[in-house]
Image (cartoon, rainbow, N blue to C red):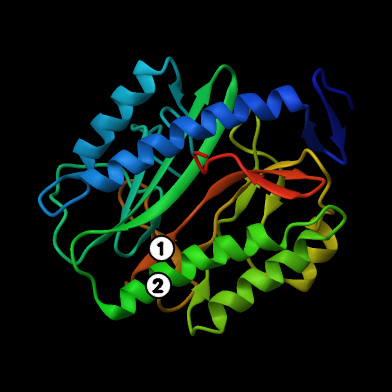
Amino acid sequence: MSRVGGRVHKGIILKSAREIGLMRKAGGLVHRILAELEELAKPGVTTGELNEVAEKRIADAGAKALFKGVVNPQANRPFPAALCTSVNDVVVHGIPDDVPLEEGDIVSVDCGVVLNGYCGDSARTIAIGAISDEVRKLLDVTCRALDVAIDEIRVGRMWSEVAKEVQACVENEGLSVVRDFVGHGIGQEMHEEPKVPNYYDRKQARSGDFRLDANMTLAIEPMVNLGSHRVRYRDPDRWAVVTEDGRCAAHYEHTVAVTGNGVEVLTAGG
């Protein structure tokens, strides 16, 4: 296999410096949008209103919404919005709506864009007003799990070694890592090889593990549940994924580029 502007290593597309620069610009746009939405997300605001802001910012930048129109064979319709907004027990893929957010809610906001042909993808979980200590711990641990993953990246290291550290960070706090949804390679497409799990499974490690190489670009996104790791689709939309036990979930994500010195976070906005 070959590819103009980069190399392909065992099915994983390695990016050129130019491509990483374009992804940095896309990631910067995503960072700015999420920062603005975090300021706007208050009791009484709807996720539909947050989506309207995101759609405008994306259009004004000459970009395209990465998620809008995506087809999922499990769902009854293409994804209809620029944002995934997942409230309380919704883990991922919540569709923005006109239900006002309430004091004590949490909402995971996932935003992706395509700018100049390259993708940026990031998520954060936002507290709406005051939240319980238990739920605050959930947010803090999930955010820390993402930081652990980023800190553990080294060229030549197997991803399973990183995933073990992420899982330990979560489970040592009595929380659970979602298994059904994982991170992914990213570049000109939202989903490229490889799959990037946040937990270690011996069987998976034999078949799907990969060695970190310079110029890999990955979307790392731990999803953590307050209770069981088990999830299910919520009917009737077959988009929203909820915790099986109805307890809260959190989700944090960054797009990163592996470098000879470790990693660059492309959605950090620096």
Quarter occupied by the N terminus: top right
- Which residue is pictured at 54% across the width and 60% down the height? 222
| Label 1: element kind | strand
- Which residue is pictured at 81% across the width and 51% down the height? 212
Q: Could you classify mark 2 by the number of other residues whose Cα lies within 10 Å: few (under 14), some (14-19), or many (20 or more)?
A: many
> Which amino acid lies under the numbered mark 1 shown in the image of this protein?
Ala
Are the two marked residues, 2 and 1, in contact with CB atoms closer than 8 angstroms?
Answer: yes
> Which amino acid lies under the numbered mark 2 shown in the image of this protein?
Leu
> Where's residue 87, x and y in %?
29, 57
* Residue beneath disc 2: 138
> Where's residue 260, x and y in %?
82, 46
| Label 2: element kind | helix
181 vs 46, nearest the viewer? 46
> Where's residue 142, x and y in %?
48, 66
* Residue beneath disc 1: 250
> Where's residue 263, x and y in %?
70, 48
